[in-house]
Image (cartoon, rainbow, N blue to C red):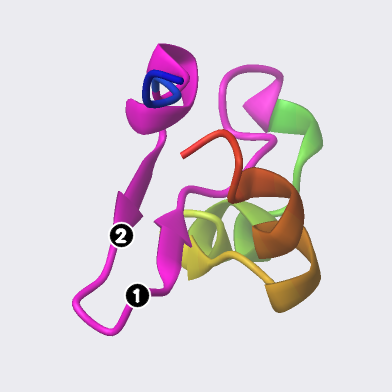
């Protein structure tokens, strides 16, 4: 059986760190920014790590 291909939409949105964790960007940044608080916009600039429970679901897509 051939290898599974990585989902190309997902590989553009995540990075794997050297320790094997998955780094991702935060949601709710694309539009309608005037309705969001300054704190919400500022904190969503940073990237965050994928949780362990989500990683189990993403593992077969990577």
Q: Nearer the viewer, residue 56 or 15?
A: 56
8 relative to 49 in the view: left or right: left
- In the displayed structure, would residue 53 be above or below residue 40? below
**Mark 1 nearby-residue class (10 Å; few <14, some 14–19, many ≥20):** few
Location of residue 3 by image quarter:
top left
* Residue at image coords 76%, 42%: 36
Q: Nearer the viewer, residue 24 or 36?
A: 24
Please indicate whether residue 56 sits to the left or right of residue 10 in the image.
Answer: right
Q: CA distance from mark 2 to mark 1?
A: 6 Å
Question: Could one spot residue 47 in this view of the protein?
Answer: no
Locate residue 27, reporting x and y percent.
65, 40
Q: Which residue is mark 1?
A: 20
User: Residue at left 47%, top 48%?
Assistant: 25
Give the residue at the far bottom of this rendering.
19
The picture quadrant where one finds residue 40 is bottom right
Q: Please give the name of the residue rendered at 56% of the width and 33% of the height, measured from the top-left corner.
A: 61
> Considering the numbered disc 1 on the image, is that residue within a helix, a strand or a loop?
loop
Mark 2 crowd level (few <14, some 14–19, many ≥20, 10 Å Cα): few
Prevailing secondary structure of the magenta residues: loop
In which image quadrant can residue 17 be found? bottom left
Q: Which residue is mark 2?
A: 16
Span shown in magenta: 6-33
Query: At which x and y percent is residue 30?
Result: 57, 21
| Residue visible at 59% across and 50% down in the picture | 59
Can I make out residue 12 in this image? yes
Do residues under tags 2 and 1 come within 8 Å of each other at their CB atoms? yes
Vertical comparison of 32 with 38: above or below: above
Magenta span has 10? yes
Secondary-structure class at tag 2: strand
Q: On screen, 3 above or below 58?
A: above
């Amino acid at each position: 059986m051939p290898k599974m291909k990585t989902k190309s939409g997902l590989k553009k949105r995540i990075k794997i760190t050297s320790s094997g964790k998955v780094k991702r960007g935060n949601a709710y940044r694309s539009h309608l920014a005037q309705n969001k608080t300054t704190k919400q916009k500022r904190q969503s600039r940073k990237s965050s790590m994928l949780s362990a429970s989500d990683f189990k679901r993403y593992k077969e897509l990577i």
